[in-house]
C-alpha cells in the first residue's frame, strides 16, 4: 500500500500539484486507462483515491509529447512516465514482429497501413473518426473505417505513432518522430538491461514478488527471463528470499524482496484511518490472486460478465478502511442529474457493527461523490 501511494494521507498539503502528481505516478509505475465511465474514468478514480483534491486537468497537463507522461501498453493501456520510454522499444519491436493487427487486416494490410501513415504525415495529427466520410449523403467508410482503426492501433503499438492528446476520449495520433523526437533520442537499452530494469523496477513497486508477479507487473518480459533474473539476483545478493504469509488460509508463498524490505516496512506509518472506494483497475487490486492472499478479499470485476451470472454488480468498487478491505459497493453516477446512486452494498466478515458500517459507507461515498462531481448521494433502501 505504501509503495502504491495508499499509505499517505490523501489530503496532505500540496499533493494535488502537477509536480506531486507526476511524482506519485512515477512511484506507482503507471496508471491504467479504461473506457468504462459508469462512475468515472479509471485513471481519475485511481488517482482521486490517493489525492483528495485531484484535478483531471493536472493529469492532462502531464500527458503529451513534451510533458512527463506518455500513453502506451503495460498489461493494458496506461499513462507511463516518459523517462521509461526507451524500454518500450522492445515492445514496439514485438508488435512489428508478431502482430494480430496485420493478420486481421489481411492481404490489403500493407496498403492500409501505408495510407494511414501517409495521411498523418501529410495532414498532421488525426483521430480514428477522421478516417470516416460521407458518401452520397449516407454514412460510409474511407476504404472501410475498421481497417483504418486497426492500422492506427498497430502503428501506435509499433511506436510509429504517438498519442499527442485526446478529444473527449478520442485519441489524437501524430508521428512519433515529429511529436516526440526527444524521446526517440533516448538510447535503447540492451535486452539484458531491459530485463534488469523490468524486474528491479517492478520489485521496487511491489515490495516483494514471486517470479510471476515480477514479469506481469509491466508485462514486458517473459516468465523465463524473470526466473533467470531472480536466480542471478539471489546469488549476487541483490535480492533476498522471503516467505509471504497469506490471510486467506493458503500456505505461505516463496518470493523475493529487496534486502532492506523489513527495515522499510518497520519505518512506515500506519495507514490513514479513513474509508475510500477503490477503482476496479487500481494497481493494489488488479492482481486478483495476490489481492486474495494478502487481504483475504476475493474480488472479480463483473462488467464483462453476463448480467444473469453476476454475483455482485456491473462496476463494484472495493471499500478500503485503513489497511483493510471491508466491503464492496455497486455505484453509478448519473451525470444528467448529478446523483451518485449506491445500488447495493456487501460487507466482509468482521467489518464492524451497523453504526461503524454506516460511517464507513457515508465517508467513502462522500469522497467518491466529491471526486466525480456528484451533488447528491442516493442510497437504495
Image: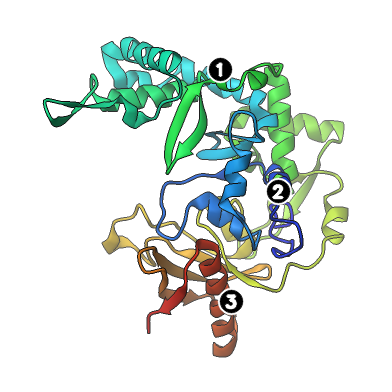
Residue linked to disc 3: 363
- Considering the numbered disc 1 on the image, is that residue within a helix, a strand or a loop? helix
Separation of marks 3 and 2 at Cα, in angstroms: 24 Å
Separation of marks 1 and 2 at Cα, in angstroms: 29 Å
- Considering the numbered disc 3 on the image, is that residue within a helix, a strand or a loop? helix
- Considering the numbered disc 2 on the image, is that residue within a helix, a strand or a loop? helix
Instruction: Mark yes or no: residue 246 visible.
Output: yes
Please report contact status of discs 1 and 2: CB closer than 8 Å, yes or no: no
Count of numbered circles on the image: 3
Q: Residues within 10 Å of mark 2 (few under 14, many from 20)?
A: many
Please report contact status of discs 1 and 3: CB closer than 8 Å, yes or no: no
Q: Position of residue 370 (x, y in %)?
A: 55, 67
Q: Residues within 10 Å of mark 1 (few under 14, many from 20)?
A: some
Along the polypeptide, which appears first: circle 3 or circle 2?
Answer: 2
The residue closer to the viewer here, 381 or 240, is 381
Residue linked to disc 2: 24
The residue closer to the viewer here, 85 or 122, is 122
Amino acid at each position: 500500500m505504501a509503495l502504491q501511494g495508499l499509505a499517505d494521507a490523501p489530503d496532505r498539503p500540496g499533493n494535488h500539484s502537477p509536480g506531486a502528481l507526476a511524482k506519485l505516478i512515477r512511484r506507482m509505475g503507471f496508471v491504467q486507462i479504461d473506457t468504462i465511465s459508469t462512475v468515472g474514468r479509471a485513471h481519475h478514480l485511481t488517482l482521486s483515491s490517493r489525492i483528495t483534491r485531484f484535478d483531471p486537468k493536472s493529469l492532462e497537463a502531464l500527458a503529451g509529447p513534451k510533458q512527463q507522461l506518455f500513453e502506451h501498453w503495460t498489461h493494458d493501456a496506461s499513462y507511463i512516465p516518459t523517462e521509461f520510454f526507451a524500454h518500450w522499444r522492445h515492445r514496439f519491436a514485438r508488435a512489428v514482429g508478431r502482430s494480430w493487427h496485420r493478420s486481421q487486416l489481411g492481404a490489403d494490410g500493407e496498403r492500409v497501413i501505408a495510407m494511414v501513415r501517409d495521411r498523418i504525415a501529410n495532414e498532421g495529427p488525426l483521430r480514428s473518426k477522421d478516417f470516416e466520410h460521407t458518401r452520397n449523403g449516407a454514412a460510409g467508410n474511407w476504404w472501410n473505417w475498421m481497417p483504418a482503426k486497426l492500422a492506427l492501433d498497430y502503428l501506435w503499438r509499433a511506436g510509429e505513432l504517438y498519442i499527442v492528446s485526446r478529444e473527449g476520449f478520442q485519441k489524437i495520433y501524430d508521428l512519433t518522430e515529429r511529436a516526440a523526437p526527444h524521446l526517440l533520442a533516448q538510447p535503447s537499452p540492451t535486452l539484458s538491461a531491459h530485463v534488469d530494469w523490468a524486474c528491479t523496477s517492478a520489485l521496487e513497486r511491489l515490495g516483494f514478488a514471486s517470479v510471476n508477479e515480477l514479469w506481469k507487473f509491466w508485462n514486458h518480459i517473459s516468465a523465463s527471463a524473470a526466473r533467470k533474473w531472480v536466480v542471478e539476483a539471489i546469488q549476487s545478493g541483490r535480492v533476498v528470499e522471503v516467505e509471504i504469509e497469506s490471510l486467506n488460509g493458503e500456505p505461505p508463498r516463496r518470493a523475493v524482496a529487496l534486502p532492506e524490505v523489513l527495515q522499510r516496512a518497520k519505518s512506515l506509518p500506519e495507514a490513514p484511518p479513513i474509508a475510500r472506494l477503490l477503482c476496479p483497475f487500481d494497481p493494489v487490486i488488479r492482481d486478483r490472486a495476490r489481492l486474495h492472499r494478502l487481504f483475504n478479499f476475493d474480488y472479480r470485476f463483473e462488467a464483462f460478465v453476463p448480467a444473469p451470472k453476476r454475483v455482485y454488480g456491473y462496476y463494484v468498487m472495493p471499500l478500503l478502511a485503513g489497511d483493510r478491505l471491508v466491503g464492496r459497493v455497486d455505484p453509478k453516477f448519473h451525470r444528467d442529474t448529478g446523483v451518485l446512486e449506491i445500488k447495493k452494498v456487501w460487507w466482509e466478515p468482521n467489518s464492524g457493527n451497523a453504526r461503524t458500517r454506516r460511517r464507513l459507507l457515508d465517508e467513502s461515498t462522500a469522497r467518491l461523490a466529491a471526486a466525480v462531481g456528484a451533488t447528491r448521494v442516493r442510497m437504495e433502501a
